[in-house]
Amino acid sequence: MIRSILFVCTGNTCRSIMAQGMFEKMLKENVENSYRYNIQSAGISAILGMSPTSEATLVMLEQGIDISQHQAQPLRKELVKKADLILVMANEHKEYIQKEFPFVQNKTFLLKKYALKNEFRSIPNNERDNEIIDPIGKQVEFYRIVAKELKVSLEKIADIIIEENSK
């Protein structure tokens, strides 16, 4: 049963906190007792206490999600141990986790790849196609594209988790 999910990116100021905010909203809207889920985010190079980027905050507010009070946190052993599922944005994050925390290899996945796990279509061979590209330093429109990409994958992941937890 998956109850604790950890989203991981580089700095924990855009992709992973956007994913966390979106996923929490999806659970609240679709799951009775959504408080039973523990959704967190962290970054492999995060600086403790950093705020989300202004672009990420704006794009999330456009979707009715307030991430403005979030404070970045570095990825730590306690976080990965507690997580039932670790979803990363890019291959470099997965490689880092496999190197630093090899005991969680079996529960660490690229977010986009995990979203396709129950579909009967092929997953792209080019691993870069399975990544959520880092929007840091780009215009707000690029953040909107990333948010759409996240939303498509997170909706599928929510369905997977809700279905698995109902068994």
Image (spheres, grey):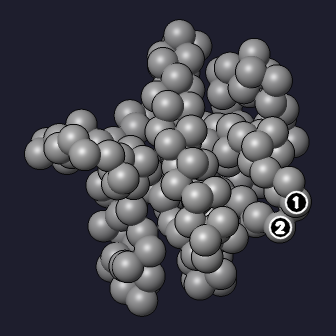
- Amino acid identity at mark 1: Asn
Residue 76 placement (x, y as % from top left):
60, 76
The residue carrying mark 1 is: 33
Tag 2 secondary structure: helix
> Which image quadrant: the N terminus?
bottom right
Q: Is residue 121 left or right of residue 73?
A: left
The residue carrying mark 2 is: 36
Instruction: Farthest residue to the left: give it.
Output: 125
> Viewer-nearest of labels 2 and 1?
1
Residue 103 placement (x, y as % from top left):
42, 89
The crowd level at tag 1 (other Cα within 10 Å; few <14, some 14-19, many 20+) is few
Front in this rendered view, residue 62 or 133? 62
Q: Is residue 124 left or right of residue 117?
A: left
Q: Is residue 17 visible?
A: no
Residue at (61%, 42%) from the top-left corner? Answer: 19
Q: Is residue 30 left or right of residue 97?
A: right
Residue 142 vertical position relative to residue 72 in the rendered view, above or below = above
Residue at (30%, 67%) from the top-left corner? Answer: 95
Q: Are marks 2 and 1 in contact (CB under 8 Å)?
A: yes
